Image (cartoon, grey):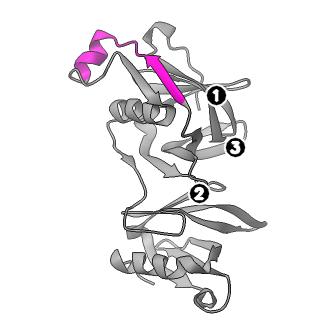
């Protein structure tokens, strides 16, 4: 993260008081032609748009909220903590109408595709603005996975000091787990997958471990047993080794 001295006149718009999970806090997110700026009570930093590798829109298991995630490289830093992901959480009933300050050079760059005003559900507005500026499509969970809560699987991620509860999202080209720690796994990185098959029997949950080609292992635990066949069929469909 870097401090920003960009003139306010160059600002395209501001998304006020957005809830962030990573880094945790409430931020005004100011959007400029080449970066976004997180402005909070103790934080005033910028993230160049060139560092945004991927964007994800991920439904919360409750069906009333949605995560919007930016995968960043290089990472951002707040105090002594490093973040590869910016994770925001939105309520689907929140709406926003904003005016966009479009300079001539910005308008020319996007060949008239950028509007003077945008309104709608807040996360939809942010998605439209970010897709335009970053020039990347937002990734959503695959339609090919029909779990008990849709394309989201509740689970725990095994860490050295215990377990962190979160969600796995099957994607067309991999998985993403949020939110502590966020993990994005591409199918081409996978060496093997090992299932704890007890979950296919009488137990209520099962585990599975993903080994990557460069030796890193990710263990996802305490997944509801009824997700076992769906997850296994999903991996077979995409020819993932296990």
Query: How far apart are labels 1 and 3 at the CA level?
Result: 17 Å
Query: Can residue 97 be found in the magenta stretch?
Result: yes
Q: Which residue is mark 1?
A: 27
The magenta stretch spans which residues? 95-109
Q: Relative to the observer, which residue lies in front, 51 or 226?
A: 226
**What is the C-alpha distance between the residues marked 2 and 1?**
24 Å
Residue 95 visible: yes
What is the crowding at mark 3: few (fewer than 14 residues within 10 Å), some, or many (at least 20)? few
Which quadrant of the figure contains the C terminus?
bottom left
- Residue corresponding to mark 2: 61
6 sits to left or right of 128: right
Which label belongs to residue 81?
Answer: 3
State yes or no: discs 2 and 1 in contact (Cβ < 8 Å).
no
The residue mark sitting in front, 3 or 2, is 2
Left or right, 237 with reference to 182: left
Check whether the beta carbons of the residues at disc 3 and disc 2 lie within 8 A of each other. no
Q: Residues within 10 Å of mark 1 (few under 14, many from 20)?
A: many
How many labels were placed on the picture? 3
């Amino acid at each position: 993260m870097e401090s920003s001295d960009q003139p306010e006149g160059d600002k395209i718009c501001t998304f006020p008081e957005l809830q962030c999970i990573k880094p945790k806090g409430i931020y005004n997110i100011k959007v400029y032609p080449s970066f976004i700026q997180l402005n909070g009570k103790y934080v005033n930093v910028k993230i160049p748009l060139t560092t945004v590798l991927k964007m994800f829109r991920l439904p919360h298991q409750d069906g009333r909220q949605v995560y919007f995630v930016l995968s960043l490289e290089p990472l951002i830093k707040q105090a002594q903590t490093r973040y590869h992901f910016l994770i925001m959480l939105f309520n689907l009933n929140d709406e926003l109408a904003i005016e966009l300050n479009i300079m001539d050079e910005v308008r020319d760059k996007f060949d008239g595709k950028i509007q003077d005003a945008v309104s709608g559900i807040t996360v939809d507005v942010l998605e439209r603005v970010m897709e335009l500026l970053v020039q990347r499509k937002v990734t959503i969970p695959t339609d090919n996975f029909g779990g008990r809560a849709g394309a989201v699987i509740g689970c725990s991620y095994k860490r050295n000091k215990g377990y962190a509860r979160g969600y796995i999202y099957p994607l067309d080209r991999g998985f993403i787990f949020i939110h502590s720690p966020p993990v994005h796994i591409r199918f081409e990185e996978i060496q093997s997958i090992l299932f704890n098959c007890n979950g296919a029997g009488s137990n209520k949950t099962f585990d599975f471990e993903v080994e990557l080609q460069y030796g890193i292992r990710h263990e996802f635990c305490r997944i509801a047993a009824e997700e076992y066949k769906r997850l296994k069929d999903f991996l077979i469909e995409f020819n993932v080794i296990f």
